[in-house]
Amino acid sequence: MRTHEVDLAILDVSMPRMTGLQAAREISRRRNPPHILMLSMHDNEQYFFESLRCGASGYVLKSVADQDLVGACHAAVRGESFLYPGVMSALVRDYLERSRRGEKVSANVLTPREDEVLSRRRGLDVS
């Protein structure tokens, strides 16, 4: 039995036995889930997007964790999102790729979770 509530879970995408993505899905289903940060060696937008879909509010690259992790933790606990610097390029590439493939690209290009994270990052309230 836990004596303290967990405010923040930091998960590694490549954890043994259960991936960080699987763990994030499980944690997000709890009644009062903690904020989730994903830590990863993968500078890959697929992992980033999947992390958002699984409930993470931030994605920190291990290669720059010494610079970004503390700030990402503070942001997550405040209810804000943390996006690594290259993610905006990934979002633009994803949008352009969807458009090139002829997929409908409208104001709803992002999933609701992706939109929520980006809106919080820009300081907008989406509640």
Image: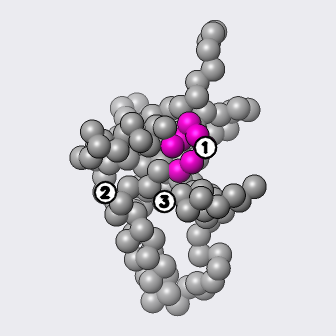
State the extent of the magenta-drawn residues as a range: 75-81
Dot 1 falls on a residue whose secondary structure is: loop
Q: Which mark is residue 79?
A: 1
Whether tag 1 and tag 3 are in contact, CB under 8 A, the answer is no
Q: Which mark is residue 69?
A: none
Screen quadrant of the C terminus: bottom right
Can residue 122 be seen here?
yes
**72 displayed left or right of 120:** left
Q: Nearer the viewer, mark 1 or mark 3?
A: 1
Query: Does residue 79 show up magenta in the picture?
Result: yes
Q: Residue at x 31, y 57 (%)?
A: 43
Mark toward the start of the polypeptide (1 vs 2): 2
Q: Which residue in the rendered view is the most extreme toward the front? A: 123
Query: Could you say where residue 41 lies in the image, as x and y percent from the top left?
Result: 28, 47
**Disc 1: CA contacts within 10 A as few (<14), some (14-19) or many (>=20):** some
Mark toward the start of the polypeptide (2 vs 3): 2
| On screen, residue 81 above or below 116 | above
Three-letter amino acid code of the residue under disc 2: Asp
**120 displayed left or right of 94:** right
Q: Which mark is residue 43?
A: 2
Query: Could you say where residue 58 lies in the image, as x and y percent from the top left?
Result: 48, 48
Dot 2 falls on a residue whose secondary structure is: loop
Q: Which mark is residue 49?
A: 3
